[in-house]
Image: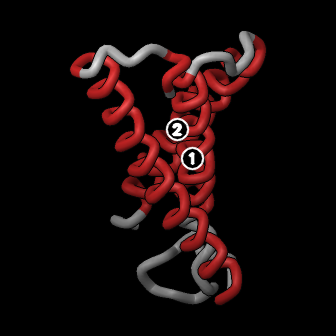
Amino acid sequence: MAFEYPFLIQITSASISFSASLVIMIMIKRATLTTPYRRLIFGLSAADVIHSVGMITGPYAPPKGLNTCPWAVGNTGTCVANGLFNASGSIGVALYLLSLSLYFFLKLTRKMSDTDF
Protein backbone atom coordinates (compact mmCIF):
# COMPACT_ATOMS: atom_id res chain seq x y z
CA MET A 1 0.00 0.00 0.00
CA ALA A 2 2.98 2.32 -0.45
CA PHE A 3 1.37 3.57 -3.69
CA GLU A 4 -1.77 4.72 -1.91
CA TYR A 5 -0.56 8.03 -0.44
CA PRO A 6 0.80 9.64 -3.61
CA PHE A 7 -2.52 8.90 -5.32
CA LEU A 8 -4.44 10.49 -2.46
CA ILE A 9 -2.26 13.59 -2.66
CA GLN A 10 -2.67 13.70 -6.45
CA ILE A 11 -6.45 13.40 -6.29
CA THR A 12 -6.76 15.94 -3.47
CA SER A 13 -4.58 18.59 -5.07
CA ALA A 14 -6.17 18.08 -8.48
CA SER A 15 -9.64 18.42 -6.93
CA ILE A 16 -8.65 21.72 -5.32
CA SER A 17 -7.18 22.94 -8.62
CA PHE A 18 -10.33 21.86 -10.49
CA SER A 19 -12.61 23.67 -8.04
CA ALA A 20 -10.55 26.86 -7.96
CA SER A 21 -10.23 27.06 -11.74
CA LEU A 22 -13.95 26.44 -12.15
CA VAL A 23 -14.73 29.27 -9.71
CA ILE A 24 -12.38 31.59 -11.62
CA MET A 25 -14.07 30.68 -14.90
CA ILE A 26 -17.53 31.38 -13.46
CA MET A 27 -16.43 34.70 -11.97
CA ILE A 28 -14.86 35.86 -15.24
CA LYS A 29 -17.83 34.68 -17.31
CA ARG A 30 -20.23 36.64 -15.09
CA ALA A 31 -18.09 39.77 -15.42
CA THR A 32 -17.90 39.26 -19.24
CA LEU A 33 -14.84 38.55 -21.33
CA THR A 34 -14.20 42.16 -22.31
CA THR A 35 -10.41 42.45 -21.91
CA PRO A 36 -7.62 40.31 -23.34
CA TYR A 37 -6.39 39.63 -19.80
CA ARG A 38 -9.75 38.17 -18.77
CA ARG A 39 -9.91 36.03 -21.89
CA LEU A 40 -6.40 34.71 -21.28
CA ILE A 41 -7.14 33.89 -17.63
CA PHE A 42 -10.42 32.26 -18.67
CA GLY A 43 -8.60 30.07 -21.21
CA LEU A 44 -5.86 29.26 -18.70
CA SER A 45 -8.49 28.18 -16.18
CA ALA A 46 -10.30 26.08 -18.79
CA ALA A 47 -7.06 24.31 -19.71
CA ASP A 48 -6.36 23.75 -16.01
CA VAL A 49 -9.83 22.23 -15.55
CA ILE A 50 -9.10 19.77 -18.39
CA HIS A 51 -5.73 18.88 -16.88
CA SER A 52 -7.22 18.54 -13.39
CA VAL A 53 -9.85 16.10 -14.67
CA GLY A 54 -7.03 13.99 -16.08
CA MET A 55 -5.18 14.10 -12.76
CA ILE A 56 -8.29 13.25 -10.73
CA THR A 57 -9.17 10.25 -12.89
CA GLY A 58 -5.53 9.22 -13.36
CA PRO A 59 -5.31 6.55 -10.65
CA TYR A 60 -8.54 4.90 -11.87
CA ALA A 61 -7.97 5.00 -15.64
CA PRO A 62 -5.21 2.37 -16.24
CA PRO A 63 -6.22 -1.19 -17.14
CA LYS A 64 -7.37 -3.28 -14.20
CA GLY A 65 -4.81 -5.65 -12.73
CA LEU A 66 -1.62 -3.58 -12.93
CA ASN A 67 0.59 -4.00 -9.87
CA THR A 68 1.69 -0.37 -9.85
CA CYS A 69 -1.90 0.91 -10.00
CA PRO A 70 -3.89 -0.55 -7.11
CA TRP A 71 -6.94 1.61 -7.83
CA ALA A 72 -7.07 0.87 -11.55
CA VAL A 73 -10.52 -0.06 -12.79
CA GLY A 74 -10.25 1.00 -16.43
CA ASN A 75 -9.17 -0.49 -19.70
CA THR A 76 -6.88 0.57 -22.52
CA GLY A 77 -9.46 3.06 -23.83
CA THR A 78 -9.84 4.84 -20.50
CA CYS A 79 -6.05 4.98 -20.16
CA VAL A 80 -5.71 6.57 -23.60
CA ALA A 81 -8.54 9.04 -22.89
CA ASN A 82 -6.92 9.99 -19.59
CA GLY A 83 -3.61 10.52 -21.37
CA LEU A 84 -5.38 12.78 -23.85
CA PHE A 85 -6.83 14.88 -21.00
CA ASN A 86 -3.43 15.13 -19.32
CA ALA A 87 -1.55 15.98 -22.50
CA SER A 88 -4.03 18.49 -23.87
CA GLY A 89 -4.47 20.13 -20.48
CA SER A 90 -0.74 20.49 -19.86
CA ILE A 91 -0.06 21.79 -23.36
CA GLY A 92 -2.99 24.20 -23.04
CA VAL A 93 -1.76 25.51 -19.69
CA ALA A 94 1.76 26.00 -21.09
CA LEU A 95 0.49 27.84 -24.16
CA TYR A 96 -1.81 30.09 -22.15
CA LEU A 97 1.05 30.91 -19.76
CA LEU A 98 3.19 31.78 -22.78
CA SER A 99 0.40 33.98 -24.13
CA LEU A 100 -0.03 35.67 -20.77
CA SER A 101 3.71 36.36 -20.60
CA LEU A 102 3.66 37.79 -24.11
CA TYR A 103 0.63 39.92 -23.19
CA PHE A 104 2.41 41.46 -20.21
CA PHE A 105 5.67 41.85 -22.15
CA LEU A 106 3.93 43.81 -24.89
CA LYS A 107 1.78 45.73 -22.45
CA LEU A 108 4.78 46.88 -20.40
CA THR A 109 7.52 47.32 -23.00
CA ARG A 110 5.50 48.48 -26.03
CA LYS A 111 2.76 50.26 -24.02
CA MET A 112 0.07 48.46 -25.99
CA SER A 113 -3.52 49.11 -25.03
CA ASP A 114 -6.21 46.46 -24.72
CA THR A 115 -7.73 47.49 -28.04
CA ASP A 116 -4.42 46.79 -29.82
CA PHE A 117 -4.56 43.16 -28.72
Disc 1 crowd, CA 10 A, few/some/many (<14, 14-19, 20+):
many
Instruction: Please tell me which residue lies in front, 37 or 50.
Output: 37
Q: Residue furthest left?
A: 109
Image-based side of 31 in relation to 35, left or right: right
Q: Which residue is mark 1?
A: 47
Do the residues under discs 1 and 2 have CB atoms within 8 angstroms?
yes
Residue 50 vs 78, above or below: the answer is above
Q: Residue furthest top?
A: 31
Q: What's the image's color scheme?
A: secondary structure
Q: Which residue is mark 2?
A: 44
Residue 52 vs 23, above or below: the answer is below
Residue 76 vs 68, above or below: the answer is below
List x then y, in percent, for residue 69: 49, 76
Instruction: Give the amino acid type for the residue marked by disc 1 in the picture.
Output: Ala
Instruction: Give the amino acid type for the residue marked by disc 2 in the picture.
Output: Leu
The residue under the point 49% across, 66% down is 87
Badge 1 marks a residue whose secondary structure is: helix
Residue 77 vs 14, above or below: the answer is below
Instruction: Please tell me which residue lies in front, 45 or 105.
Output: 105
List x then y, in percent, for residue 24: 61, 22
Badge 2 marks a residue whose secondary structure is: helix
